[in-house]
Image (cartoon, grey):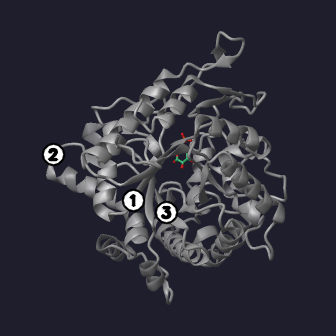
Amino acid sequence: MAFPEGFMWGGATAANQCEGGYDQGGRGLANVDVCPHGEDRFPVMLGLKHISQVDSEHYFPALEGVDFYHRWKEDIALYGKMGFKTYRMSIAWTRIFPNGDDAEPNEEGLRFYEDVFKECRKWGIEPLVTITHFDCPMHLIQEYGGWKNRKLVELYKRLVAVLFERYKGLVRYWLTFNEINMILALPFMGAGLTFDEGEDQTASKYRAAHHELVASAWATKIAHEVDPQNRVGCMLAGGRFYPLTPEPADVLEAMRRDNENYFFTDVQARGAYPAYALKFMEREGIDIPWQEGDREILAQNTVDFISFSYYSSRCATTHKDEMGGQTSGNVFASVKNPYLKASEWGWQIDPTGLRITLNSLYERYQKPLFVVENGLGAKDELVDDGNGGKTVIDDYRIDYLRSHIKEMDDAITYDGVELWGYTTWGPIDLVSASTGEMSKRYGFVYVDRDDAGKGSLERYPKKSFGWYKKVIATNGADL
Ligand code: BGP
């Protein structure tokens, strides 16, 4: 059997996309709460439109999520019934420090997650915790400019120290920053950045990235000091770039685009800025705000494992205009691959690309890998299940997941990749990060809620629920 014993099957969510309860338990507001639904969403996430310019009549989907804040027992029970070995979830920074720089942590927030982790353990589920999943307290953005400011490193260190101490023995697997490379594509979402007129945006992004990378290394150090059993991973929005043609210029362009992303994991897994990045920054006149001790912290505190999200591969060419056609897959603009089909949102589907990405990361870092997001966003229809209940017949979702699991199997069996686990994105329907909508669904469990925030919030297992349960029970043998 390909999947090793103890393989960590499960699902992944983010606090701001499922919790809701935004004004309860002493919680403060974060950047991800104020990204509106509709046409202002992208300008805000890109840092080009300030939230003060957004009409307050707008609907802010993340504020209510799918009410995990009140339904966590019910949801964890559903995960338990599917046989989850792990549940990847994130902490809302503003539940622990409502403003980010408060003198004391908020006990109510700390207790909430403690109860959640204990409930997971009751079901034999190992929590895998993302410390920040795109969230940055609004107060830190307004007061300090988000991750542009070095002050955030200190505040993040304080946050993680509180978490590691409090959840010692309850949580062992940690991810420092969700899709850390997303700072380049969605800087407000990734790091709370907004830009002034005439500001060198690229320089600001890399300067903020430096702060996140240093903070990530500090988190790794503190995690290991508090409990040597802790395992800390980086988290990359993954997916290899293919050259659109075998023309050497395209191959080179694909390498360059890959390196834009690998820059982050190179620092986190190898402990130093790679040569190609140093040269790029020199050329662009990007002045990284190094401080004494940064190089040592990075070098001495590399991550224990590499985690990544995978939705699609990407394509690169130097002949964009001639080849035509962009794809929106996972926000990184890339050229359409003529060999691939796409989801309703234009995200191209490429199971083989997962095997290629696994190989590429394993070869590069020789560290254990963890696929922490993968899935198909689709429109689902709730129908009668024939027993007086309701369900969704989501064979398209099963097909997507099956084909990707098969590629992981091959990567282990034929290529010898070390893979610790697999958590599908959104095991329960939740608010989409890119659209802010509910109708882009990923779950094994349907949630009755629509794009306008209406619905009973009732949960209904879909056909894929039983399928995934069987996959886990057979450790991936019966797909
Ligand atoms: C990743 C994010 C997730 C998630 C996922 C699916 O980039 O880490 O938060 O939302 O993509 O994206 P979407 O919700 O836009 O379909």
The answer to the question of whether label 3 and label 1 lie on touching residues, with beta carbons closer than 8 A, is no
Q: Is residue 402 above or below residue 296?
A: above
The amino acid pointed to by label 3 is Gly
Percent of width and height locating residue 268: 43, 69
Looking at the image, in which quadrant does ligand 1 appear?
top right
Q: Nearer the viewer, residue 428 or 379?
A: 428
- Secondary structure under tag 3 reads strand
Some atom of ligand 1 lies within 8 Å of the CB belonging to the residue at label 1:
no
- Secondary structure under tag 2 reads loop
Say which of marks 1 and 2 sits in front: 1
Q: Quadrant of the N terminus?
A: top left
Percent of width and height locating residue 329: 43, 41
Q: Is residue 182 above or below residue 295?
A: above
Q: Which residue is mark 3?
A: 233
Q: Nearer the viewer, residue 63 or 469?
A: 469
Say which of marks 3 and 2 sits in front: 3
Q: Residue furthest top?
A: 386
Q: Quadrant of the C terminus?
A: top left
Quarter where residue 123 is shown: top right
Residue drawn at x 15%, y 52% is 248
The amino acid pointed to by label 2 is Pro
The amino acid pointed to by label 1 is Pro
Quarter where residue 274 is shown: bottom left
Q: Which residue is mark 1?
A: 368
First reached walking from the N terminus: tag 3 or tag 1: 3
- Secondary structure under tag 1 reads loop
Percent of width and height locating residue 369: 40, 56
Task: Using the image, tell me which numbered label, if any, was put on residue 246.
Answer: 2
